[in-house]
């Protein structure tokens, strides 16, 4: 089918949707309503099959870099403003359900042909497809091709007449019958399963951590827990916690923590010991240390929150407790600093003082949609150093390594105005998205409208009195509090401190 035919077909679908949306539904009877919903449900199940084919062809015709992105996941999430998880799901299903494109010769059948055929006929929905895909991915490695194909066919047959939950239960039973003893334990399997994951921070500040330890990792932490998680050790409720040697009998008797709580406190103590050892080197130009940004008002009032370079929110009381245990940096946006923040052309890389100020201002990668915290970011020049850019703090921004490289290689451009870092996408990805990343700076969403005196770049205006032009910038009116002419220059936004 030619490009013209595809455009005409898509236009016909759009026109049909518009016509349907304009229909008056108030006079439809119950059977008519149900019939229309049935047809729409079938069409909704079929449309993803067309999208898979289009995505498959797009990936053979171009590359993410030619589209202005670092990955196909970014192409989908930026252009159509969907989450990266949804973009990954669509790409995965397209790889399995669209015809495969070889280097030469005709297209090959989909990797899951029965599933693709059922979806193309509208017999199964997205939930069925996800259950089938995940179940096939769990098949043991010893299962031969014929058995895999029959397994898929049985799942599709069940999906046509059952819901996703029933299909998932049937798939789980079949997988159990195929491998009732489970995989044989070996070093390769243990290494594949190892990992430690932190969940999202909850509203109360706590975080769920899950781990799959190798025997070696368990042996290491067993002996650490035996020392630091013993009763009376590392107890934050003690005025003078015991972190070395042996706790007193009174400390042991007054320790009412559970084993899980003691192990948690032992991990905190072990982490502090490692941080204070000075053996961790540097991370992106700064000694490895906890960096927290907060406001001067919160520090003075002992209320509020602080945010780490990775985005973790801490109550101000814990911020102060952390600070009491560490040699820390302090960057206060209060009109004056003792560090040189404008280096012009004297060096290409940012100084530690500049990095700290950028962590306080940006909080993380400034590219819209990126959730990488400040610990994982590099310093990006608004105007590239090779093209005459300056290493001044108001011409720098935080960007994770892939996004930092995308400015030169993928056609992205940046613009820094008033401390806000705008990212302008290349034409292939520009659909009018937001230019600022508010993920690390949600307080920007609460800003009141810009006052009139700041409009038009705060240019001085003139007024005429008795036929004589008078410059407002020279009048006796009080200057704004953050006027650039005041000593120390303008205060950064929101009175941030790190």
Image: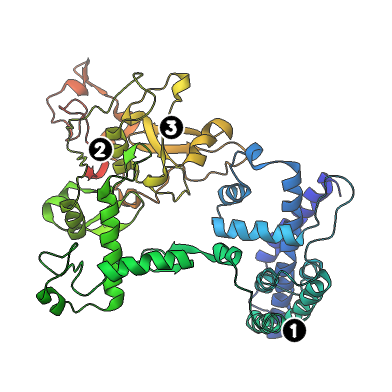
Place of residue 477 in the rendered image (x, y in percent of width and height, measured from the top left): 13, 29
Measure the C-alpha gap from mark 1 to mark 3.
55 Å
* Picture layout, residue 297 above or below residue 111: above
SS under mark 1: loop
* Picture layout, residue 322 above or below residue 416: below
Q: Is the C terminus in the top left, top right, bottom left or bottom right quadrant?
A: top left
Residue 492: which numbered mark, if any? 2
Place of residue 366 in the rendered image (x, y in percent of width and height, measured from the top left): 42, 42
Q: Is residue 278 left or right of residue 189?
A: left
Q: Nearer the viewer, residue 223 or 336?
A: 223
Q: Is residue 2 left or right of residue 13?
A: right
Place of residue 245 in the rendered image (x, y in percent of width and height, measured from the top left): 17, 64
Task: State the residue at coordinates (64%, 74%).
Answer: 183
Instruction: Please tell me how crowded label 1 is: few (under 14), some (14-19), or many (20+) other residues with Cα within 10 Å.
Output: few
Instruction: Please tell me how crowded label 3 is: few (under 14), some (14-19), or many (20+) other residues with Cα within 10 Å.
Output: some
Q: Quarter-wise, where is residue 28 in the image?
A: bottom right
Task: State the residue at coordinates (18%, 72%).
Answer: 232
Instruction: Say whether disc 1 or disc 3 marks the residue closer to the N-terminus.
Output: 1
Q: Is residue 237 left or right of residue 82?
A: left
Q: Quarter-wise, where is residue 355 in the image?
A: top left
- Marks 1 & 3, CB-CB < 8 Å contact: no
Instruction: Say whether disc 2 or disc 3 marks the residue closer to the N-terminus.
Output: 3
SS under mark 3: strand
Q: Which residue is mark 3?
A: 415
Instruction: Say whether disc 2 or disc 1 marks the residue closer to the N-terminus.
Output: 1
Q: Nearer the viewer, residue 393 or 352?
A: 352
* Picture layout, residue 17 above or below residue 450: below
Q: Which residue is mark 1?
A: 161
């Amino acid at each position: 089918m030619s490009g013209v035919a595809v455009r005409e077909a898509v236009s016909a679908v759009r026109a049909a949707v518009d016509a349907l949306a304009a229909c008056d539904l108030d006079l439809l009877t119950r059977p008519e309503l149900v019939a229309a919903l049935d047809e729409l449900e079938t069409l909704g199940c079929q449309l993803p099959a067309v999208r898979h084919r289009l995505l498959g062809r797009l990936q053979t015709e171009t590359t993410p870099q030619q589209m202005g992105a670092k990955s196909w996941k970014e192409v989908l999430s930026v252009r159509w403003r969907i989450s990266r998880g949804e973009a990954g799901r669509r790409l995965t299903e397209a790889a399995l359900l669209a015809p495969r494109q070889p280097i030469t010769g005709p297209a090959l059948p989909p990797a899951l042909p029965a599933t693709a055929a059922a979806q193309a006929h509208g017999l199964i929905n997205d939930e069925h497809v996800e259950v089938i895909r995940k179940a096939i991915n769990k098949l043991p490695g010893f299962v031969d091709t014929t058995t895999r194909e029959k397994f898929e066919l049985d799942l599709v047959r069940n999906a046509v007449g059952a819901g996703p939950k029933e299909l998932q239960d049937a798939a789980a039973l079949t997988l159990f019958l195929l491998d009732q003893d489970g995989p044989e334990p070996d070093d390769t399997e243990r290494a594949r399963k190892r990992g430690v994951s932190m969940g999202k921070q909850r509203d109360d500040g706590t975080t769920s951590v899950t781990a799959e330890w190798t025997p070696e990792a368990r042996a290491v932490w067993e002996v650490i827990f035996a020392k630091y998680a013993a009763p009376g050790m590392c107890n934050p409720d003690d005025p003078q916690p015991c972190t070395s040697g042996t706790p007193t009998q009174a400390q042991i008797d007054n320790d009412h923590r559970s084993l899980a709580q003691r192990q948690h406190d032992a991990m905190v103590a072990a982490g502090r010991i490692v941080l204070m050892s000075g053996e961790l080197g540097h991370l992106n130009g700064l000694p490895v240390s906890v960096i927290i940004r907060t406001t001067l008002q919160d520090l003075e009032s002992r209320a509020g929150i602080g945010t780490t370079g990775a985005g973790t929110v801490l109550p101000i009381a814990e911020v102060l407790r952390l600070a009491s245990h560490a040699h820390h940096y302090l960057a206060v946006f209060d009109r004056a600093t003792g560090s040189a923040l404008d280096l012009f052309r004297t060096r290409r890389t940012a100084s530690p003082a500049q990095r700290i100020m950028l962590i306080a201002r940006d909080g993380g990668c400034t590219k819209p949609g990126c959730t990488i915290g400040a610990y994982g970011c590099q310093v990006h020049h608004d105007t590239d150093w090779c093209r005459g850019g300056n290493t001044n703090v108001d011409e720098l921004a935080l960007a994770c390594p892939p996004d930092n490289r995308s400015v030169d290689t993928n056609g992205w451009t940046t613009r820094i105005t008033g401390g806000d870092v705008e990212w302008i996408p290349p034409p292939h990805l520009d659909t009018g998205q937001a230019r600022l990343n508010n993920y690390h700076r949600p307080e920007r969403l609460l800003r009141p409208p810009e006052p009139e005196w700041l409009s038009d770049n705060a240019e001085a205006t003139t007024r005429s009195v008795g036929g004589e032009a008078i410059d407002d910038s020279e009048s006796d009116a009080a200057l704004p509090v953050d006027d650039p002419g005041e000593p120390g220059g303008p205060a950064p936004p929101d009175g941030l401190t790190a």
